[in-house]
Image (cartoon, coloured by chain):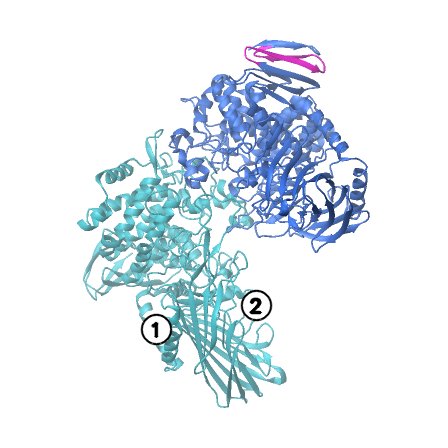
Chain colours: A cyan, B blue
Amino acid sequence: MTKRLFDIDPWVIKTNKLAVADKRLQESITSIGNSYMGMRGNFEENYSGDTLKGLYLAGVWYPDKTRVGWWKNGYPEYFGKAINSPDFLSIPISVNGEDVDLAKIDYTNFALALDMHDGVLRRSFVGDFADGVQVKFEFARFMSNKTQELGLISVKATVLAGQAELVFQPLINSNVHNEDSNYDENFWELKNHAAVANNRYSLTVETKPNPFGTPRFTVTEQMQSLVSAPTEITREANVTEEAVAEKITVALATGQSVDLLKQVAVVTSRDVEESQQQAKATEILQAASQKPFAEHLADQDQVWQQRWAQSDVQIDGDPAAQQGIRFNILQLFMTYYGEDSRLNVGPKGFTGEKYGGATYWDTEAYIVPMYLAVTEPKVSRQLLEYRYRQLPGAFHNAQQQGLKGALYPMVTFDGIECHNEWEITFEEIHRNSAIAHAIYDYTDYTGDMTYVLDHGIEVLVAISRFWADRVHYSKHAQKYMIHGVTGPNEYENNVNNNWYTNQMAVWVLKYTLSILKQISTGKAESLAINTDEAAHWQDIIDNMYFPEDKELGIFLQQDGFLDKDIRPASSIDPKERPINQHWSWDKILRSPFIKQADVLQGIYFLNDQFTPEQKKRNFDFYEPLTVHESSLSACIHSILAAEIGEEEKAVNLYERTARLDLDNYNNDTDDGLHITSMSGGWLAIVQGFAGMRHHDGQLSFKLFCPKNWQGYSFKVNFRGRSLAVKVGHGQSEITLLAGDDLELTVNQQKVNLQPDQTQLINN
Amino acid sequence: MTKRLFDIDPWVIKTNKLAVADKRLQESITSIGNSYMGMRGNFEENYSGDTLKGLYLAGVWYPDKTRVGWWKNGYPEYFGKAINSPDFLSIPISVNGEDVDLAKIDYTNFALALDMHDGVLRRSFVGDFADGVQVKFEFARFMSNKTQELGLISVKATVLAGQAELVFQPLINSNVHNEDSNYDENFWELKNHAAVANNRYSLTVETKPNPFGTPRFTVTEQMQSLVSAPTEITREANVTEEAVAEKITVALATGQSVDLLKQVAVVTSRDVEESQQQAKATEILQAASQKPFAEHLADQDQVWQQRWAQSDVQIDGDPAAQQGIRFNILQLFMTYYGEDSRLNVGPKGFTGEKYGGATYWDTEAYIVPMYLAVTEPKVSRQLLEYRYRQLPGAFHNAQQQGLKGALYPMVTFDGIECHNEWEITFEEIHRNSAIAHAIYDYTDYTGDMTYVLDHGIEVLVAISRFWADRVHYSKHAQKYMIHGVTGPNEYENNVNNNWYTNQMAVWVLKYTLSILKQISTGKAESLAINTDEAAHWQDIIDNMYFPEDKELGIFLQQDGFLDKDIRPASSIDPKERPINQHWSWDKILRSPFIKQADVLQGIYFLNDQFTPEQKKRNFDFYEPLTVHESSLSACIHSILAAEIGEEEKAVNLYERTARLDLDNYNNDTDDGLHITSMSGGWLAIVQGFAGMRHHDGQLSFKLFCPKNWQGYSFKVNFRGRSLAVKVGHGQSEITLLAGDDLELTVNQQKVNLQPDQTQLINN
């Protein structure tokens, strides 16, 4: 069922084949971005075949109205969408009047390559035109990491045979739409567009008014094209009703080339008010025009060299796995690198519309643990600040449900919930605890207490107040309970006492009480927790109900779980997999099959609370029931399989996550990449195979090397240190590259690492 | 919170006040229909104030597309709507060029009256115009019960002062729309419209094409106006782009009158193919024109006299209750009287758009038991034939869920489910058993075995096969269970082992097995039930799990019910009632509060299976938790309260159902009347106060008279007999009006009724 469009290579995603039938998939995989903006791998020149055009600006969204037949009180009124922004990529090209369109012309020597060193996308082909004319085209593009508002698109055309009049029409087009818009709406109003001085063209749009009171965004895109050719270049403006374009004509003989560099500056009202946008864009373009393309490229490489130096994972003996992990790291860093605390990591990043650039709990559950290790602490801290900023929205969400405290949203752009299935919006509330857990994770991993004592405690108290109001006391059972929830396993809805939700709620209350003991008097006064409230929290901690089956020695996913028709996922007819594409929702809900880690997610998060035997019993019970139909599932299972010593299973599960998009494992990458799942491969290697854990500020590893690998190595930052870990069969090495000496536990032995020292470990 | 717009009167719904602020409510209550077509109480002349225009044709619908953000496999693709049909009511009128519009002109002597004897709506007022001109207008309209395709609208205008040129413009207008259409769509295409011979005008429309393969409908409406006046009458055609109209001008002096009778024939492709519709409509109008209005009225009265003779309920000492019960019977009979087995009883009948004319389980649960007693058996049988006809749709619905057998829909026009909330579509499957129970009800009440042996058994077997596939065997509990359902109490969703659903499923299997013993060999062969299948059904019957709490002596609404924070509905802040308008869905679902009878619905249906003590314990436990926010709730509780001897409670609950619409109890009658709840008042009187039951072909009563009534009487048909029951304080009478002698039980005493004999009963 998998589909692999690109060659295996350690540093390049490349192919010599245009995937006509899988163009969207190819576009998703060749998406690029710089965390400020990004785009799918669409073509510069016209392409009349199937394509999903997409160019997105971080934090620029629209509240698409959402109608359901049967409204419920408290429902959100809109579903936020990352909207397709004015197209600044396109450069229609003609050769002797013939439109260059790979769906129509003959061509040879096609090559497409995304360089993972620096996020530069290159493409080339030789087009055959009338009268034997042949022209070679070479494209290169990247979104600058040095100047975030800057996009660079270079085209070189070389006439290989005959005489060619080449016309390039670099443009910015406001007429774009979202495929998944509910009502075929356009989201933009064109405010002005014109040629400005010095071959510069500018276009300003504003998102349409909306009835929901969410902010409107203004965006100015400005372009200039630097052209060099051995012959005369004719340039003329072409401003149409909805676009600005320039028409650049050059006539070349065989052997001659033209180079065109389209530079685009994109400025939004998130940073620059509308009246200043033109000037700001001009300033960026003027600066950009001072440097040749090669210098821009060198700047780009420099940024990425620093990133890879902290984050690269090397795998010996498995080139496909090697490519997979680098692709995931590249795409994650192209989506988010912590520059702006108003932004987060969207499930599809800049690579597609579906789920758009909205924020989910994926960030705290799967992204933060990886970023903590491979970037500077400030990068992860920005993700925490994001939630702190959105606390007012979380208070609003709780209030919508008639509850106290704060409920972080399932899907959001600004903190306000914008998902409208009741079983998710109102019930998948475990997300709230993941927000709190990320605070713990950051604090314990980095040792930096300032966030939790200053901002984090406000978030923790607000979440704790939500849980204290959301539980109820069952007089019949004489226990606190949490009814009506959807756990991480979304294949059960509206269940009672989801073990994970109950566990995490209690954990949040405990952690909050522990932090409250450490805060300043001023902070304590502003939080106004009195002894009654704290006592009530303690009462909930002491008397929460956790479903379990003592005979089987397992925690129960929810109250009624054992009453189901329990049978392994292997008993499902393979023709009916994935079940979410074949079964009615009703059949899925009643089945014992689990979409993603649920009880096991709790054991993963609260890893130090459970015995090896508890971990093994629960893993052995739940993993066989799990269909892993969430891209977030396999990595957690791989990590736990490694922990309980099921190395083969750990490797199998790792393989489902490592090349999810490169091999189109879930048959849906045409929509866009699974950005938030991309940390899964890294987690499976580092927390799984290398067994990395941290608890009470102590770092530990438990190493093994998959059989079919010769070895692997990675680096992690930890509390001011940089460590290199190299794992082989039989023997491994850990080196303290930077920072003070560190005591850690490796394979259950204490190890004291000195600066620049390498410790050999037997495993 | 109630609002009463009309005066109390035993036979007329009348008022002298135009309810400008509550026009929609007034329109709902003055709706009329003849089960073939019907309309809200809109005005003939123009009205520029707030109004909800509505004119509906039975069985004419459109599949409105429905989009939800997150599609599930097996969801229906459309939501069927009863669509607003071309307006044939309107007759714009002007006086000396001034538009007669009660939102604009001065008027006096307003009167509006719906005569419950015959369903004729009358209205009159005196309009004041420029120069002291006064004109009295008198309107009367009804939808003929003699000729179902015929509507009659009469206007008389009398000049009381001055000289008046009166212009009437009777019209048929195709430009109509539904307020609740998802996308502001128009549903009709105008096919042709023209003046035809002899002052007749015709307009033909067809529903727009739809992508779902559901039938398109063609409708021809033809009108003629009979006008008489003492002066010259000028008539001219006025055919506009979207309407046909006639302009009728007459100049009158003080004291003179003009009479206009607009006769309309409505023919649809449900009965007459398009090419024949014009001719058929003409034929109807030609016949109609042979009779004066008075004769049409006499025909109408005759039909209704027969109906009332079988169905009238008299209440002495409570004129409001008297009016309420007659209004309910009138509106029910105007909606449905069994002429056409392709039709059913829509929750709003012809009185509004919301829920439209679609079919719900309300019919089997609440309508059939009443119709069995107050109409001929053939009327109820048509409702059963309706489901038999739709068996293919029910097979389709089960298949959509991946299940065997037949699943009758929650909402439908043609048997195919068209509701798209998963917790209803996929889960509120108890509806299937009500379909089967109506077969039992009909068969046992009428003694007519032909339906069940010929058609009904096919329905029963199909439903049984669904249940046998929908249950699962819990190895852990060693019981059959039904997980993932929504019971009649829609304030819980996706629960396990709803006691009602489990009980009714087992009851269906039992009843089906009992009928299978009585069918013909040919029928048995065609049904192909082998011994294994029957044995499996018996195994389910023998080993079904029913949740109960032995200590409390109650059946449990569902597995987790007792774990809730159980507290009485009286503890809810009155400002937060009804909770469905104040609480988030999440809060409602987690609460212990019950929307409508659930366990008690089962005790109502399977009344003979439970002891008086069981009934009392469950009533005492569940009724205090019930918020009665379904219009179908109070009557069932009233009946059971009466049965367990809580007479005061029975009367209180009756009062919530008896004048639900007349007093706008739920503050939503502006949308339309609660047609399918209208049997509730009757059921509360006859099954509640009079305790009527039937079981194994035996009829019984257990009579009491509410304290504030002097007495009440009603008639019932039963197995070829007609009985009159007159209940007083202390003493009651039962008379066998027609049919053979009958042994029945009254107040637990055997009574043998002889023809024309009245038995006195002490109560």
Q: Main secondary structure of the magenta part?
A: strand
Q: Tell whether position B729 is magenta.
A: yes
CA distance separating discs 2 and 1: 34 Å
Q: Which secondary structure, mark 1?
A: loop
Q: Residue B323: horizontal and vertical position, in percent?
A: 59, 26
Numbered range of the magenta stretch:
B728-749
In the image, A607: left or right of A81? Answer: left
Q: Residue A329: horizontal and vertical position, in percent?
A: 38, 64
User: Dividing the picture into quarters, in which one does residue A676 lie?
Assistant: bottom left
Q: Residue A447: horizontal and vertical position, in percent?
A: 22, 56
Assign the C terminus of chain A to one quadrant of the image.
bottom left
Type of amino acid at the residue the image marks with label 1:
Lys
Residue, disc 2: A20
Determine crowd level at label 1: few under 14, some 14-19, many 20+ residues with C-alpha closer than 10 A.
some
Vertically, is A375 above or below A297? above
Determine crowd level at label 2: few under 14, some 14-19, many 20+ residues with C-alpha closer than 10 A.
some
Between residue A381 and residue B347, name the one nearer to us. B347
User: Dividing the picture into quarters, in which one does residue A331 lie?
Assistant: bottom left
Q: Which secondary structure, mark 2?
A: loop
Type of amino acid at the residue the image marks with label 2:
Val
For marks 2 and 1, the one nearer the N-term is: 2
Vertically, is B662 above or below A205? above
User: Dividing the picture into quarters, in which one does residue B272 lie?
Assistant: top right
Vertically, is B191 above or below B1? below
Residue, disc 1: A146
Chain under callout 2:
A
